[in-house]
Image: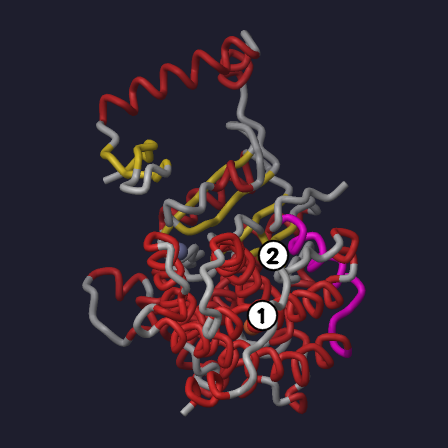
Amino acid sequence: MTLKRSASASPRGVAWPQVEAVTIGDLLQRNAHWAATKARIDPEYFRRLSAQQAPDYLWVGCSDARVPANEVVSLDPGELFVHRNVANLAPSQDANFLSVLQFAVEVLKVKHVIVCGHYGCGGVRAALSGKRHGMIDHWLAPIRCLYEDEAGYFDRILDFEARVNAVCEANVLAQVRAVASNPFVQEAWVRGQGLSVHGWIYSIKDGLIRDLETSVANRKEATRLRTRGGAAHG
Amino acid sequence: MMIEDHIRAAAPRHPGGIERSPPALLKEPLEFLFAEHYRHRQMCKILEYLAVEPAFDASLIAATDDFIRYELALHVIDEEEDLFPLLRRRCEPDDDIEDVLGRLSADHALDQQLAQAVRSIFALALERRTPPSALPGGAEALLKLAKQEKGHMALENAVVMPLARRRLTVDDLEALSLRLAARRGVAAG
Ligand SMILES: [Fe+2]
Ligand SMILES: [Fe+2]
Ligand SMILES: [Zn+2]
């Protein structure tokens, strides 16, 4: 359920945010309000958008509701092609992800693929918890492996939340490596298509993105990224 | 015992408020963080003062509560989700930084509990218009946070800051500066 805040008086008479439920009907009303506002500012906005989709960026991010892709990079609809799943994975056998990647690279010809993770990721935390959660454990298995492969490094980070954050970063690096070695991306580079892959991490606590310095723009750089250090050290 | 020693010692003088760091300092991110530590030390002095002060000082309590609520919380993000991950990436294995960072991260988690206890005391003090020192557990909560913070900062100043000066690149400092400012609502000009 989504909650909205409204001001009401606390016992001490200070305005205090309270939460009340947003109904499904509210969403339709908000949509009408949003569309009307856009149309008022720019009467041709939607007609222009509907005519073509030509984003320069593919965003591979987490499904977490607190990481809204377009909003955090301040891009309008139409400017960002978005794929989101739990813990921002780029699995080489996932038909959904592969379809998105191929379409983005070969049809939309995006110039950048951005893998954006976030600190405190619930998917990463679940993978590290050692508990059984159900179907999601299968999805998160690559993160568990990533952690176990370098457990000696990660376990030196005694604080659990700090360790989760370190694995969040390592996961972004692993997914950048996966995207960069994906045949669709490799083929694009062979064709001479301009395409870069980047690894970023976002913090829900401050709304800021950090560049993890994993950007690659050709096969040579991709190979170098694949062979440099372990997951932990990038 | 800590509280009794503190009460037996000469009562601390009014330490004054916590001054703002000049905004220009944001351009020197490590200096800025160092200055933040100085402000935190000032917060500790106020906590030690309020732990024994018999008079009720609403504005000092409210200002300190605000500092804990906003500034202390921001500083933990500055370190936990910015400086520390950056150091983990930049430090050499020989720097052997993980044990220190691990302890500091655990401190940050404990800080939040201790800070919450102090904020509860402050809320009660303001509601009853009573000095925190007169509330049950008041002095103890305030002194605990002060002691914890002082030890924590000493370790950061002695180990983390010198290492950050050595290992962070010019680009790191520039990016760090941008984010420290953005976190405080200051956009890059
Ligand atoms: Fe700290
Ligand atoms: Fe600090
Ligand atoms: Zn997530």
Q: Give above or below for A117 relative to B107.
A: above
Q: Residue at x 64, y 70 (%)?
A: B37
Residue B49 shows which numbered tag? none
Near-viewer residue (B69 or B81): B69
Q: Amino acid at mark 2?
A: Arg
Q: What x and y, as percent, mark residue B43?
A: 57, 67
Q: Which residue is mark 1?
A: B85
Display colour scheme = secondary structure
- Looking at the rendered structure, the secondary structure element under dot 1 is helix
Q: What x and y, as percent, mark residue A183?
A: 53, 55
Question: Can residue B172 be seen in the rendering of this structure?
Answer: no
Q: Is residue B33 part of the magenta span, yes or no?
A: no
Of all residues, the one furthest to the front in this rendering is B55
Asked if residue B54 lies left or right of residue B10, the reply is left
Badge 1 crowding class, 10 Å Cα cut-off, few under 14, some 14 to 19, many 20 or more, is some
Q: Classify the position of ligand 2 by quadrant: top left, top right, bottom left or bottom right.
A: bottom right
Are the residues at dot 1 and dot 2 in contact (C-beta closer than 8 Å)? Answer: yes
Q: Is residue B172 part of the magenta span, yes or no?
A: yes
Segment tinted magenta in the rendering: B166-182
Q: Residue at x 19, y 63 (%)?
A: A134
Near-viewer residue (B144 or B162): B144
Q: What x and y, as percent, mark residue B161?
A: 70, 77
Q: Amino acid at mark 1?
A: Pro
